[in-house]
Amino acid sequence: MSAADDFLGRPAGANFALVNVKILSSSHPTLGEGVGVGMRHEDTELKAKIDAALCELIKDGSLAKASEKWFEANILASCK
């Protein structure tokens, strides 16, 4: 059971529904590719640390496993 299914099965989720939305272009100028995290533009050192940590988790399979557990799909982008 995904986190979304769990929420939808509770009273708090009674007025919500899961819909299948697909973004057809990963090169959309507004959306870009993947998922984002907000941080200040000048925090380049922090960004590099976060990127390195995420790449390590992608390479060892940890994030794919979590993605399958919580989203019932692998939603990961590749490491750059």
Image (cartoon, rainbow, N blue to C red):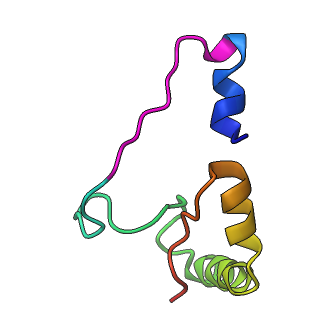
Q: Position of residue 69 (x, y in %)?
A: 73, 54
From this view, report whether residue 31 is shown above or below residue 19.
Answer: below
Give the percent coordinates (x, y) of residue 59.
69, 87
Q: Position of residue 43 (x, y in %)?
A: 57, 74
How many numbered marks does the figure carry?
Answer: 0
Kindly indicate the quadrant of the structure image that contains residue 62: bottom right
Give the side of residue 3 with respect to residue 19, left or right.
right
Above or below for 61 versus 5? below
| Quadrant into which the N terminus falls | top right
Q: Is 7 left or right of 39, judged from the image as shown? A: right
Q: 46 or 8, which lies in front?
A: 8
Q: Main secondary structure of the magenta part?
A: loop
* Front residue (pair 46, 30): 30
Asked if the magenta segment contains residue 47, the reply would be: no
Magenta range:
12-22
Q: Residue at x 66, y 76 (%)?
A: 50
Residue drawn at x 38%, y 69% is: 33
Q: Position of residue 31 (x, y in %)?
A: 32, 59
Magenta-colored stretch includes residue 14: yes
Query: Relative to residue 69, is residue 32 depicted above or below?
Result: below
Residue drawn at point x = 61 percent, y = 80 percent: 51
